[in-house]
Image (cartoon, rainbow, N blue to C red):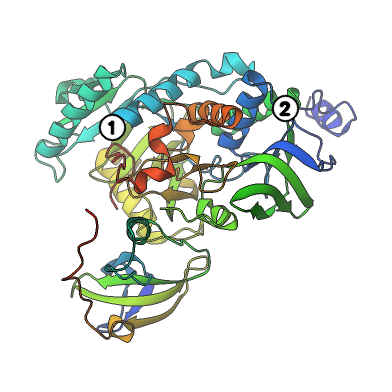
Amino acid sequence: MKQMNCPLNGLRNISEFIYGGEYHPMPDPQQCDKREWVEHVFFHENAAGEVTEWWCHSATSYWFLARRNSITDEIIETFPASKLFNKRVDFSAAQGES
Amino acid sequence: MPFGLLKYGLSKDYPAQQHFTPSDTTLKKHYDVVIIGAGGHGAAIAYYLSKYHGITNVAVLDKGYLGGGNTARNTAVIRSNYLTEEGVSFYRDSVELYQNLSNEFGYNVMMENRGQLTLAHSDAAVRSFRWRAEVNQHLGVRSELVDRQTIRELVPNLHMPEDGRYPIMGGLWHADGATARHDAVAWGYMKGACERGVELHQLTEVQDVLVENGKLTGIKTNKGTISCGCAVQAVAGTSSVVAKMAGIKLPVHSFPLQAMVTQPYKPILTPHVSSPHVHVYVHQTSRGEFVIGGGSDPYPLYNTRSTLDMKESLAAAALELFPFLSQARLMRQWAGITDMTPDYSPIMGLSPVENYYLDAGWGTWGFKATPISGKMMAELVATGKPPALIKPFELERFYRFAQINEAGATAASH
């Protein structure tokens, strides 16, 4: 079976992982308009080629990021989310239109 | 006889009738309508445009060949037992058009009305089938909830243990369920369109969609740039890639869906049998082969490769329903690319680019929608206004949070 290198657990069968969607930077919830937010939630690049994605090792509920080629299915690199997320996102004052 | 046939095949008299545009035809400088993608949908749009709207200065472009993409890679299931009012009405009209397609073309699409049985393995599934049956009947679609005895009569070879791992508690019987030869559907539509003056250009790859000030101006291909009044993209499997050329982002994720067929057997299974719970559907073709399909792959990929894990799980699920298949050999396997939308409904209609229309997001529901989407998209192209039947499926629905949650879709499990 195809294997994936989990940053926490090492090399594991691909069946132990759950695909969690494309990674794209979140727009600032305080600043962005509704259309921008909709696109962030529902729309995808769905690129043919190199993509960065969320993955989860289901047995340990560990979420991380992976770079993968969406044509050849080659997993290029896996890394902890902390590499891209190093500060807390503040949702508290987000009001906007409802 | 075989030598006579060979001689005829090599002679100048063959083919007796040219069905499609000759392959040495060069692209014109301008077309009123350019259709990107010569699959069932693209061919159907061209057909209805030329036959009912008198628009014949149309080019259908394809990177490969006619009906060579996902039109050839689906499992040819036709049904309308969906759950939402918008979905059921849309697919109902498609099934009706299918019923008369061979007559309309004068070309046999091998339509077979076999019916479709969906199995419930839990109380929750029985409840949801009751709901689906009510919605279907209200909208004029033949669906009914059936008990174990009726299932046994409909499919005598189905394994129905009293205390199995997946007990069969009831089913949704859909008498309108059918199958047809998918290649013939694309050929029939394209033949009809070409007879009326539409041009089919195969091996013609679209490399760019030219947009100026939010308005479509032309299409760049590997055989030259053409100007056009409007264009439609009908490229299931690569919807996002082509839309990106026009600067459009779609709510689509592309997953492979793997299927396979066994060696041929004598006819023993009439209806199409599907089990959303064990993730498998099985039907026997008129050639005798069992077609086995299931859910999409667990993660997106633009590749029709085969994986042993998916084949194993498909085979295990098929054996759960039909243990006699344990001795069957697999003859072929293949995969198609399903463009999944978050609400399991297609995207049809206007796009953010003026005069550029979308026929995308066809997930696992594209083949069965071929006639009606062709007819409706042709009306949209001819009038510039989306017909009421497909208005709810516009891309803009996501911005209005008006998704059409189609829980009746195959592989609606992601």
* Amino acid type for the residue under numbered disc 2: Thr
Q: Give the distance between the C-alpha atoms of the residues marked 2 and 1, in whole angstroms.
A: 35 Å
Question: Which of the two residues, B195 or B257, is positioned nearer the viewer here?
Answer: B195
User: Does residue B68 appear in this view?
Assistant: yes
Q: Which residue in the protein does label 1 denote?
A: B84
Where residue B183 sits: x, y (%)? 59, 34
Q: Quadrant of residue B194?
A: top right
Q: Which mark is residue B294?
A: none
Residue B163 position within the rendered picture, expressed as x and y whole percent measured from the top left = 9, 40
User: Which sits in the foreground, B396 or B90?
Assistant: B396
Mark 2 Cα within 10 Å, few/some/many (few <14, many 20+)? many
| Residue B288 appearing in the image | no
Task: Identify the residue under disc 2.
Answer: B56
Is label 1 in a helix, a strand or a loop?
Answer: loop
Above or below for B115 versus A71 = above
Image coords of residue B46 (percent x, y) = 64, 30
The amino acid marked with disc number 1 is Thr
